[in-house]
Amino acid sequence: MNQTTKTCYEEKLEPYAQKFKAIGHPIRLKILCLIADQEVPCVGDIWRCLDQPQPVVSQHLAILKHYGIVTSEVKKTRRIYSISDPFIKNLIDAMICQIKAESNSSSEKMAEKSE
């Protein structure tokens, strides 16, 4: 048995494939970025930031909840969301860091050109 066969058992990959499919929609990625970047993100904050109707955001949140990627809890009159899946949390954090690094690099290049 070669190394690839040992580490890539189909039954082990299926849950990850489902998670990637669940987060693959641009709106869901934006939702996850907002949740990761805010201290207390509630559904109202999320749909206002995305400039999307509340039912659209709720539908995407339901998909993320279905796959165990996010959880919510009620605090007073607000439903607060968090990323509950550590694998996805690490992935989103890494993506945010990469985007910020790319943005900083682009900003520095623009500043150099204007000098």
Image (cartoon, rainbow, N blue to C red):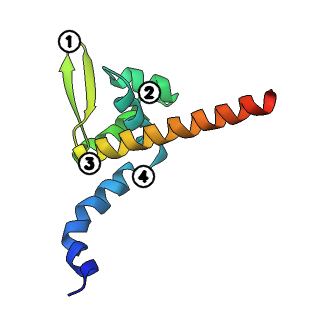
State yes or no: discs 4 and 2 in contact (Cβ < 8 Å). Answer: no
Which element type, helix, strand or loop, lies under badge 2?
helix
Q: Which of 52 and 10 is in front in this view?
A: 10
Cα–Cα span, label 1 and label 4? 32 Å
Disc 3 residue type (three-letter): Phe
Q: Earlier in the sequence, mark 4 or mark 2?
A: 4
According to the picture, the residue beneath numbered tag 1 turns out to be 76
Q: Which of marks 2 and 3 is in front?
A: 3
Mark pair 4, 2: CA separation: 18 Å
Label 2 close to label 3 by CB (< 8 Å): no
- Tell me which residue sits at (23%, 60%) in the image: 15
What x and y, as percent, mark residue 46? 41, 26
Q: Earlier in the sequence, mark 1 or mark 4?
A: 4
Residue assigned mark 4: 24
Q: Give the mark, 3 or 1, whose residue is nearer the N terminus.
A: 1
> Tags 3 and 1 in contact by the CB under 8 Å rule?
no
Identify the residue at image location x=35%, y=32%.
36
Which type of secondary structure does the marked residue at label 1 adopt?
A: loop
Q: What residue is shown with label 3?
A: 87
Q: What residue type is labelled 1?
A: Lys
Between label 4 and label 2, give the one nearer the viewer: 4
Residues at marks 3 and 4, CA–CA distance in whole angstroms: 15 Å
Label ID, residue 47 = 2
Mark before the other along the chain sequence, 2 or 1: 2
Q: Is residue 88 left or right of residue 55?
A: left
Q: What residue type is labelled 2?
A: Trp
Residue 63 visible: no
Q: Which of 43 and 1 is in front in this view?
A: 1
**Marks 1 and 4: CB-CB under 8 Å?**
no
